[in-house]
Image (cartoon, rainbow, N blue to C red):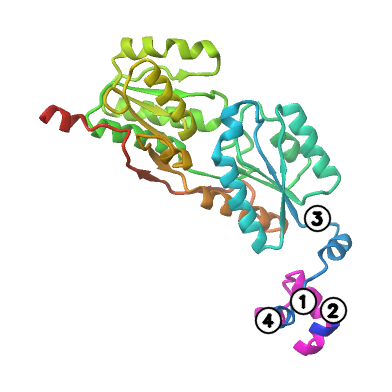
């Protein structure tokens, strides 16, 4: 026979209403009582009927994770999204929440998916794992006053949005400074996206580092069309670049392959540094020097802040910054050592 609320209440020596409030984490119940009742629940193997509980409370006990439009192979294969979903799912489990994913190939379809999830009460709130200037999702969520958190820096409504992010401008600056410290003076910046906020921030950081070092900086090398790849060799020759900062690991692998196709060796001819410290950093050779952005913390904190909103805690316009770490590997050549040889 299944264990009931009455069984737990009798064993714990409390009222059935107290057990129900413990299940719902009601603030009227003391922490000592919660611990006692939860221990009895665990010992007896009691599992709350979440479906019945949620029906009465008009909640779903689910979080919606919104991915950006998966309109390219790079985005489909980017491990950042899977790692973030895993981090969110792990933290959600601690709050007895499940995770539902909203994805599509374009923003119009994505918005319809989010609207459906919201109107049908499939989820209690959302976590957006991107920040894009063309995004209609944020406007919808703000207008409808739907609880959500953003991983990234919003383009507008900063005073209304709870967001968690790395300091992407600092990331771009420190990646560039690492190259400069290794003796590189002609450094480029490459990206396959120009409408996500992290591109602007990381590119600004690159520019800032070059200016502070009294070095010339160059327009971003953008690879959004097939013909953009054709000019790569010419740009390297014209600028005589010895190093390049790349928007993320996955695209850095593409840049390394492109360089090799033109006979440009990494790191002998061209040093490469990127961001995310994903699985791609050690799947190819040479191993990729990358800045670890602490995806686990990004997902965990975003979930915690969404739960705070769902618990009606005041958290409008909160920015939380996650620390990062440079992981040195094999794609950056120290020109000082080369000169000494």
Vertical side of 106 occupied by 24: above or below: below
Mark 4–mark 1 distance (CA, rounded to whole Å): 10 Å
Q: Quadrant of residue 180?
A: top left
Q: Residue at x 30, y 19 (%)?
A: 241
Vertical side of 41 occupied by 292: above or below: above
**Is residue 192 on the magenta stretch?**
no
Residue reaching furthest to the left: 340
Circle 1 residue? 46
Q: Quadrant of residue 95?
A: bottom right
> Where does residue 197 sit, x and y in percent of width and height?
54, 31
Do the residues under discs 2 and 1 have CB atoms within 8 angstroms? yes
Mark 2–mark 1 distance (CA, rounded to whole Å): 7 Å
Circle 2 residue? 4
What SS does tag 3 mark?
A: loop
Q: Residue 186 vs residue 83: left or right?
A: left
Q: Is residue 155 visible?
A: no
Nearer the observer, 88 or 135? 88
* Disc 1 versus disc 3: nearer the observer: 1
Q: Is residue 328 visible?
A: yes
Circle 3 residue? 60
**Magenta stretch?**
9-37
Q: Dot 1: within a 10 Å radius of its alpha carbon, few (fewer than 14), some, or many (20 or more) residues?
A: some
Tell me which numbered mark, 3 or 4, is placed earlier along the sequence: 4
Nearer the observer, 143 or 25? 25
Nearer the observer, 44 or 206? 44
Mark 1–mark 3 distance (CA, rounded to whole Å): 20 Å
What SS does tag 2 mark?
A: loop
Mark 2–mark 3 distance (CA, rounded to whole Å): 22 Å
What SS does tag 1 mark?
A: loop
Q: Residue 255 vs residue 9: left or right?
A: left
Vertical side of 323 occupied by 311: above or below: below
């Amino acid at each position: 026979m299944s264990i009931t609320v009455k069984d737990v209440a009798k064993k714990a020596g409390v009222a059935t209403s107290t057990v129900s409030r413990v299940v719902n984490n009601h603030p009227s119940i003391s922490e000592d009582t919660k611990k006692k009742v939860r221990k009895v629940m665990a010992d007896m193997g009691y599992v709350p009927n979440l479906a019945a509980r949620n029906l009465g409370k008009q909640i779903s006990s689910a979080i919606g994770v919104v991915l950006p439009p998966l309109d390219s192979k790079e985005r489909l294969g980017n491990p950042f999204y899977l790692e973030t979903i895993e981090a969110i799912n792990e933290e959600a489990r601690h709050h007895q929440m499940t995770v539902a994913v909203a994805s599509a190939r374009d923003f119009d379809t994505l918005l319809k998916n989010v609207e459906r999830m919201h109107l049908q009460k499939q989820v209690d709130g959302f976590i957006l794992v991107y920040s894009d200037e063309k995004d209609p999702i944020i406007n919808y969520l703000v207008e409808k006053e739907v609880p959500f958190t953003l991983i990234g820096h919003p383009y507008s409504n900063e005073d209304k949005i709870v967001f968690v992010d790395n300091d992407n401008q600092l990331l771009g600056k420190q990646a560039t400074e690492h190259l400069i410290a290794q003796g590189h003076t002609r450094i480029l910046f490459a990206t396959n996206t120009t409408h996500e906020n992290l591109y602007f921030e990381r590119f600004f950081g690159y520019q800032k580092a070059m200016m502070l070092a009294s070095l010339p900086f160059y327009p971003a090398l953008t690879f959004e069309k097939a013909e953009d790849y054709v000019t790569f060799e010419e740009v390297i020759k014209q600028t005589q670049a010895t190093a390049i900062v790349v928007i993320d690991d996955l695209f850095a692998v593409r840049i390394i392959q492109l360089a090799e196709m033109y006979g440009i060796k990494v790191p002998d001819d061209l040093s490469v540094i990127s961001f995310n410290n994903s699985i791609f950093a050690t799947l190819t050779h040479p191993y990729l020097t990358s800045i670890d952005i602490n995806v686990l913390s990004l997902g965990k904190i975003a979930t915690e802040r969404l739960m705070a909103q769902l618990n009606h805690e005041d958290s409008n316009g909160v920015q939380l910054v996650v620390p990062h770490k440079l992981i040195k590997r094999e794609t950056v050549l120290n020109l000082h050592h080369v000169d000494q040889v």
